[in-house]
Amino acid sequence: MSTLPSFPVGDLPAMWLRDNCPCAGCRDPRSGQKLFQIGALPPGLRVGSAADAAGEAAPAVEVVWEPDGHRSSYPLAWLEAVRPGRTGHGDLRTEAGKELWTAREVAGRLPEADWEEYLGEPGIRARMLESVLRLGFMLLRGVPGREGQVLEVAETFGYVRETNYGKLFDVRVEPDPNNLAFTSAAITPHTDNPYRDPVPTLQLLHCLVNDAAGGDSGLVDGFAAAALLRREDPEAFDVLTRTPVPFVFRDAGTELRADRPLIGTDPLGRVREVRFNNRSIGTLRLAADELEAFYAAYRTFAELLLRPELQLDLRLAPGDCLVFDNTRLLHARTAFAQDGARHLQGCYADLDGLASTLAVLRRADTLEPLAELFAGAVSAEYLGEPVTMAQHMLQAGALAQAAGAPPHLVAAALLHDVGHVRGDVVTGRDLMTGNDNRHSHTGADLLGRWFGPEVTEPVRLHVAAKRYLCAVEPGYHDRLSDASKYTLEVQGGVMTPVQAAEFAGLPGAADAVAVRRWDEEAKDPDAATPPFEHFLPLLTALMRG
Amino acid sequence: MSTLPSFPVGDLPAMWLRDNCPCAGCRDPRSGQKLFQIGALPPGLRVGSAADAAGEAAPAVEVVWEPDGHRSSYPLAWLEAVRPGRTGHGDLRTEAGKELWTAREVAGRLPEADWEEYLGEPGIRARMLESVLRLGFMLLRGVPGREGQVLEVAETFGYVRETNYGKLFDVRVEPDPNNLAFTSAAITPHTDNPYRDPVPTLQLLHCLVNDAAGGDSGLVDGFAAAALLRREDPEAFDVLTRTPVPFVFRDAGTELRADRPLIGTDPLGRVREVRFNNRSIGTLRLAADELEAFYAAYRTFAELLLRPELQLDLRLAPGDCLVFDNTRLLHARTAFAQDGARHLQGCYADLDGLASTLAVLRRADTLEPLAELFAGAVSAEYLGEPVTMAQHMLQAGALAQAAGAPPHLVAAALLHDVGHVRGDVVTGRDLMTGNDNRHSHTGADLLGRWFGPEVTEPVRLHVAAKRYLCAVEPGYHDRLSDASKYTLEVQGGVMTPVQAAEFAGLPGAADAVAVRRWDEEAKDPDAATPPFEHFLPLLTALMRG
């Protein structure tokens, strides 16, 4: 390791770099969780030596640590991506992760979709969920007008959050209301449940009936309003971010109080939460000058929130379901005539579950090239064996799964020969004409785009595993098919004892041997194999962040 | 209004004072919600005149506002309690609302109770829930060892929060764990689900089996640890409060990320949340010097959290259920031998629901004097009528309820004669000897301890209502009982037309007339009446905060 590595790892903060060591001793290969305590790293930790990783792996820098001798191998692409000073996406829950809007900017391009299409098409579902994160809302049309349906809408992306209003609440005129929501009165822009902590971060409103004159809905982007306040009256903005406000609610069975500012910011001062509800602000207890300053700022913000250009007006029709970010968007409704019927059903849920559902949906998208590769390999010949290339790989994956192998090995078995395939051209034909196509390395490098070494390394070593088994396992060579005996020679032949010992010491060698055995078995023309889609959940779970 | 009022209301911040106007036009008497927009108050709002409220009400200051002429009446006791500059309890979720502890300080006095006693005795239940808020945990013993029981424990104080681990999760060794919790490995002190936002604020762990060698539990007060860090290394504390940390989790169906500091503070800098989990910290993206500073502070805090004097050691036995604040307490477990069985079931819930349950439990406590008053009145004669004083009042309340009256009127009817009662002595006897005991005022003043004017004023005016009805309603006087005709004269006789017009203009007059009619009816010796406890939920709901 005397030449300079491709990335100056010695200049990086040592604890940070070590904390990100991807080896199987530092991170559980299955859960990805860190296996060591930060305090267990030795004081004076530093890079002892660093060099580009030997061999033909995806470019990586290997570090030997002082004083403990631990070895870490960092993919070069990862080092480039996260190098200090380059800011990451940061906290997408703050204004930095949002597209702020005024009414005019969204009126012509509402994030809306038909319920059936939302359910049936993952691409549409992903676009809608992304709208909730980016714009703060989505509007589903044609949602069946059944009572309780709103809970099913919530379950498409997360978990219902039960509150004192129930799992589900009816928004209609009630005889003895515990909340003005359940009257026909106009309600100005507000967020819900400000007296809850944690506040429900998503609200759903599903319209069942709206025959009343009035009762129109409005949405205001509270982050845009807060940003406007910061520009127009920075002192007022500052007061509202630093004054905890008591929000209170009480009825027969409930007594809630939360002390939170009207505008919540993250440690970097970015807007992260708006909590605004004039109905439930309790008595502030502050010095007189602080009260004067707070009330002046509160009035300024309240007036700003009522500017018509900020409010998107909507009229919910039966079958519409509005889903919005209750930490950001304020909602309002106009008064309505009591002689017309108006009935919405609502529930609460949380943003974290929605963001997770979206992220998992997107994983499947990014695996599209692999799905296409399998589709192409359906008609591709497999090295003179009586199965197609797709059948061979799907059989190997199914055999691993049937054997109870962990997900990373099922994936490695399923994907071990992807280096042979380019569309419907199988590069393995070269191999049969005496040229090693080095398909195990090509495949491993290709897979590195999605998966970590627990998947790529057994793939990389599965050809070497054949050479190894021929060396160490009596009778193994004899059992190989003729085609396999031929390619063995092209690929380097039986290992010498020294080569075999070196191989056995490599990370992933035992896994590669396991993959090799399923590889050998997976040549049955009569076996039923699951389609590639069967493995998608397993593969998406293994994908790197 | 020329003399100075008892409280200098003109010196108070005008917007603040007006925002707290308790009149029925400013606050919905039923829900307590504010009915006006802060921006709707006129600019230049100021106290026009102020004086002690006329009449014999509980001491109050009446304000006439400029420029809009609105009138507000503020109880003197309220003004004294919330006067600016006197700090309120503030945010009880911060360290200011907690009792911080080290292991030694709680080891001898664990907040623990038997499950049956917790269920059966509201006082014990309140004490335990209060422990969760103050100390961060409670330990219930003897909880039935049934699977799913932990959900029932959560439902005694709140709502279960579902996560990717389910509504309920099993903590035991699993074959293909997505989390180290589901192995037999030791786990150092941590909070759960740091990658969720909102993070579940409560965790429950119910022990079903613990036969394994090892597998002991530990709790660390994260607020105490953070306070210690602030004392010992203020710079490290500061770095940890201002650095958002990416917490990440992914498996087959889940991909979560939350960017939050390890130590969260409120706008006043007080510790409000600790989020600590070495397993799920992702890659920080900062400048190199910030990374150095963060890792130094992170290591310092991590080491501090491992100090033995901070960790309370517990061994959960079958039937134990630990409930703890996941925004404050870190929990840990020692490794255990895989040949012994260990099985916990857990779930998440939230602190706001628990605090609400506790507040409602406490309301019933504070109504104890009224319950005692009714118990005394069971044997007390009612002014020569064929019912006891308790029967009379309970009947009046039941009649109001049967008539569909709103809760504040049911309460007023139920409580209208409390001014007659002192223990089992009924001061009404004086009235029958020709001395007005002014029981309506005494009663209203007594009730002011718990209830607002919507309850107290109809009680105060219910005697005047009799004088009024005799003046304006033909035949009313004739229908009065003889005793009632006698007391009418002692109480001032039939109103003059001018007195009647003045009465009709008073707030609460119409309600007082309604109470009066139930009062007249409630003299049936054969009527079945509900016990006082029947009205407790209704009364507690009406109590002022």
Image (cartoon, coloured by chain):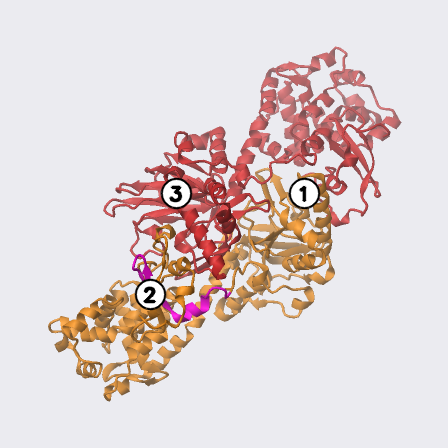
Chain colours: A red, B orange
Q: Which residue lies furthest to the left in this view?
A: B474
Q: Hey, what amino acid is under mark 1?
A: Gln
Badge 3: few (under 14), some or many (20 or more) residues near its Cα, within 10 Å?
A: many
Q: Which mark is residue B23?
A: none
Q: Quadrant of residue A408?
A: top right
Q: Do the residues marked 1 and 2 share a common chain?
A: no
Sequence-wise first label, 1 or 3: 1
- Chain letter belonging to callout 1: A
- The residue singled out by tag 2 in the image is B49
Q: Residue furthest front?
A: B2
- Chain letter belonging to callout 3: A
Q: State left or right for residue A396 relative to residue B373.
A: right
- Image depth: mark 3 or mark 2 in front: 2
The reply to whether the magenta stretch includes residue B23 is no
The picture places residue B178, in percent across and down from the top left corner, at: 63, 43
The picture places residue A235, in percent across and down from the top left corner, at: 50, 48
- Image depth: mark 1 or mark 3 in front: 3
Q: Residue A205 carries which label?
A: 3
Q: Do the residues marked 1 and 3 share a common chain?
A: yes
Q: Hey, what amino acid is under mark 3?
A: Leu
Q: Which residue lies furthest to the top in this view?
A: A433
The reply to whether the magenta stretch includes residue B70 is yes
Front residue (pair A451, B490): B490
Q: State left or right for residue B313 relative to residue B52.
A: right
Question: The N terminus of chain B lies in which quarter of the figure?
Answer: bottom left
Give the vertical position of B26 relative to B298 (above or below). below
- Chain letter belonging to callout 2: B
